[in-house]
Amino acid sequence: MRLRQSGKPNPFMPLTGDIKLLVIAGICLVIFLLLFIIVFVILYRQRQDLLVKRNEQIRSEYNQTLLQSQLEIQEQTLKKISEEIHDNIGQVLSLAKLHLNTIDTPLEKEAETKMISAKKLVSKAIQDLRDISHSFNTENIQALGLSRAMEEELEMIRRTGKYTVSMRQEGTLFRLKPQHELILFRVVQECLQNIIKHAEANCIEIMAQYDQAGLSIFVRDDGKGFLVNQQDQLLPTQGLGIRNMNARVSHIGGSVTIESSPGKGTTILIKAPGTTTITG
């Protein structure tokens, strides 16, 4: 007895050539779409990364330009103050000293002693103002060089009679770019001012270490010290602290770090790359 064939297709029958081509074409299309999506995502991410890097570069260039402008304004301001001190206050004190020196009238012993004391005070005031004027004067600092300028800054502190100071140098001295030396000197000045204001120290030491990696400046004191905030590394009672100094030194590719603990003094390390080898 012969079975009647059904009109429904048999799912287990082998695929014909046309159906195979359609299946292969569909698989290829899906693979192509997947590859297209993957490539698109990769290109999109690369473009996003480039955009982020570009934005960071623009932000960095802007910050550098802003810092450079701030430094130029600061130096112009300090130069103006230096000129005013030298031309006006210094001149007035010099005239006062001249008048004191020209008094020939016989005086009683006590009055004469006071006159001598007044002359010494005026002379000291004139010298201090000259030192401050030189310390502010950019051209004077550049002419002296960083090492000599730091020595003179320490000498000015020594003459107050409140501190024992010392300056050491290791390695072969070389000069950095004038603008770089000026930035480093201003940061050293800020360190010294912080010691005078906050450290309650007796001894201050600066060590300049010259080597192939560049210049390392250690500013040490034997003051009361403090707990360093490792995240921000803030100096006590100073809001900007090391971040302000770091911003200035980073402009020349350097860095600033602090080591301190209560009762053990403070060491501030200022590092700058050596971009020149001009011996001095």
Image (cartoon, rainbow, N blue to C red):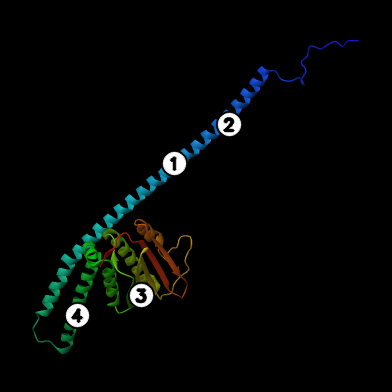
Q: Residue at x 15, y 86 (%)?
A: 112
In the picture of the structure, the residue carrying the numbered disc 3 is 204
Query: Which of the pair 61/272 is nearer the observer?
Result: 272
Amino acid type, callout 1: Leu
* Residue that protrudes farthest toward the right in the picture: 1
In the picture of the structure, the residue carrying the numbered disc 1 is 50
- Label 3: few (<14), some or many (≥20) within 10 Å? many
Q: Is the residue 79 above or below the residue 40 in the image?
A: below
Which of the marked residues, 2 or 4, is nearer the chain's N terminus? 2
- Label 4: few (<14), some or many (≥20) within 10 Å? few
Image coordinates of residue 37 in percent, x first then y, are 55, 32
Amino acid type, callout 4: Lys
Alpha carbon separation for disc pair 2 and 4: 90 Å
Kindly report which numbered mark, 1 or 3, lies closer to the viewer in this rendering.
1
Alpha carbon separation for disc pair 2 and 3: 69 Å
Kindly report which numbered mark, 2 or 3, lies closer to the viewer in this rendering.
2
Kindly report which numbered mark, 1 or 4, lies closer to the viewer in this rendering.
1
Alpha carbon separation for disc pair 2 and 1: 24 Å
Q: Is residue 239 visible?
A: no
Which of the marked residues, 1 or 4, is nearer the chain's N terminus? 1
Q: Quadrant of residue 131?
A: bottom left
Q: Secondary structure at mark 2?
A: helix
In the picture of the structure, the residue carrying the numbered disc 2 is 34
